[in-house]
Amino acid sequence: MSLGKILYVDDDKLLTSTFATLMKVEGFNDVVIYNDPKEALEYLKIEQPDLIISDFLMPEMNGLEFLKEAKKLYPETSMILLTAYADKENAIKTINEIGVYKYIEKPWDNDDLIINIKNGIERSHLLADLRDKIEKLEAAQKELKKYSEKLEDLVTERTKELSVANDKLSGIINYCADGIIIIDSKGVIEQVNPATENMTGLCADALIGKSIQEIAYTDNPLMNKAPKSDIETSILGLAQDQSEFLLRDLYIRNSLSGEYIPAEINFAALSEGNKFVGVIRNFTAQKEAERLRDDFIATLTHDLRTPLLAAIQTLKFFLDGSLGEINDQQRVMLTTMVKSNEDLLGLVNALLEVYRFEGGKLKLCKTVFDVNSLLKQCHKELAPLAEKKNILFNTHCEPDGEILIDADRSEIKRVMMNLCGNAINYTNKDGTIDVYLKMHGKDLMFSVADNGNGIPKEDIPNLFKRFSQGTHKKRSTGTGLGLYLSRQIIEAHGGKIWVESKVNKGSEFSFILTDVAAASRVG
């Protein structure tokens, strides 16, 4: 391994020979020697040494002149000047003028010379590394300057784009027909758009700081009792889930007109956390369209009852012989027509009942009656249907005796008949149905359990909706109104209805009526 490249220039051949021998002994293998400084300069134009050693007094070009030229080519290369004692002052002058690293007097001490050579080579390497790092640093500074200039342009351009986007977003928010609000995790309003101001009849300053519960209600006081707002739980749930959340069937009160506007609010969490943006959609037009549609259907179904009843009665006149004798074939056809018209009348009556409940026009007629006796009556009417399929149809009552409750007897019977009838329809032959009636204090619990095919989990949420028929795998031939109407009746009594089911194991439909026990219940 080379310790460094050394160039030695001296017109004394004896000294150069001695120097070469010394270098070889010390392990310096890369040594170039010239006796003519001009030839040495030509060499320097091609090669760069790590150390230059030059004699001071030489013919044609002295050491001072030679080292000046060498310095121009390689300013970082260390240079040592060899001089006699008499030329010491000239040597000092040379050091001051061209920055010679060291001067050594002749005759030199070998150990001292070797030390200075090694230090000089190391100095050259350090200066070269320093120069390289400086050049890299300067290059990096230039690149940084260019990047900084580009960054400024990029920031300016991006700021302009953001400004344009912000203007567009502000335009969308300010001119949006839907109300837009921003609330915190406690439901306190922090920002609103003009549509929200118009909807509530309050300016932004009046709205900010209010709770969402102060402007949004779950009940319409024009149709029910005093307004209430129980959406705080939903807001807190939204804050915990950090997800979208839709609040349906709300009413926004306009403080100027006193009007309650039907609406829904779709909330979504903002990226900054614990804040949510809500879009308030006015459903007045949709509600009015639904009202007109429901009124039309209710009117239509009501008007259909009279001709259907007339047709059924006329057909029965034919069947009982009031209008003359009929043969067997005619009897079969007329019986089929009566059954079809009665089914259609049942559908019309179910539709009419649904729209009466939804419109709040049907009032419950509550009386005190024996619900156990009512269950036995329902069982007696449905038993023939169960026997046709060889279904074991059991009732269980606790306590087994008179159970008096205060409710609408005809509507509760409708629910019982519907739940038990559905169980018979959806239970296979040789199946089992168990009906349970039990009092828990003042609360009545009713359940119908079967071992039929069961209901898929994904279909259960739709069972109590209007026109829901069977499951996505098996469609019922019914109206799809029975369970919906049952839910309306139970909820009108302040109760709750639900279902638990497992595929291929069966279903259990239940409802509970709270605080319905009559004071004189006998066990």
Image (tube, grey):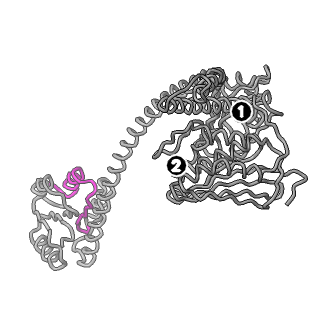
- According to the picture, the residue beneath numbered tag 1 turns out to be 357
Residue 458's disc is 2
What residue is shown at x 25% (from left), y 61% (from top)? 79
Q: Is residue 363 above or below residue 274?
A: above
The quadrant where residue 230 appears: top right
Q: In which quarter of the image is the N terminus?
A: bottom left
Instruction: Answer whether residue 77 is magenta in the image.
Output: yes
Closer to the eye: label 1 or 2: 1
Q: Earlier in the sequence, mark 1 or mark 2?
A: 1
What residue is shown at x 58% (from left), y 33% (from top)? 343
The quadrant where residue 485 appears: top right
The quadrant where residue 342 appears: top right
Q: Where is residue 25 in the image (x, y as percent from the top left)?
A: 16, 80
Q: Extreme right residue here?
A: 520
Q: Where is residue 316 in the image (x, y as percent from the top left)?
A: 61, 28
| Magenta region, residue range | 61-85
Which of the two residues, 109 or 337, is positioned nearer the viewer here?
Answer: 337
Does dot 1 land on a helix, a strand or a loop?
helix
Which of the two residues, 432 or 493, is positioned nearer the viewer here?
Answer: 432
Q: Position of residue 77 (x, y in %)?
A: 25, 59
Q: Is residue 387 left or right of residue 259?
A: left
Q: Is residue 295 visible?
A: no
What amino acid does circle 1 point to? Phe
Q: Is residue 157 left or right of residue 359?
A: left
What amino acid does circle 2 point to? Glu
What residue is shown at x 54% (from left), y 50% (from top)? 426
Q: In this view, does 108 lie above or below 154?
A: below
Q: Residues within 10 Å of mark 2 (few under 14, many from 20)?
A: few
What residue is shown at x 10% (from left), y 73% (from top)? 17
Q: Is residue 174 above or below residue 9?
A: above
Q: Is residue 420 left or right of residue 518?
A: left
Q: Position of residue 133 (x, y in %)?
A: 34, 54
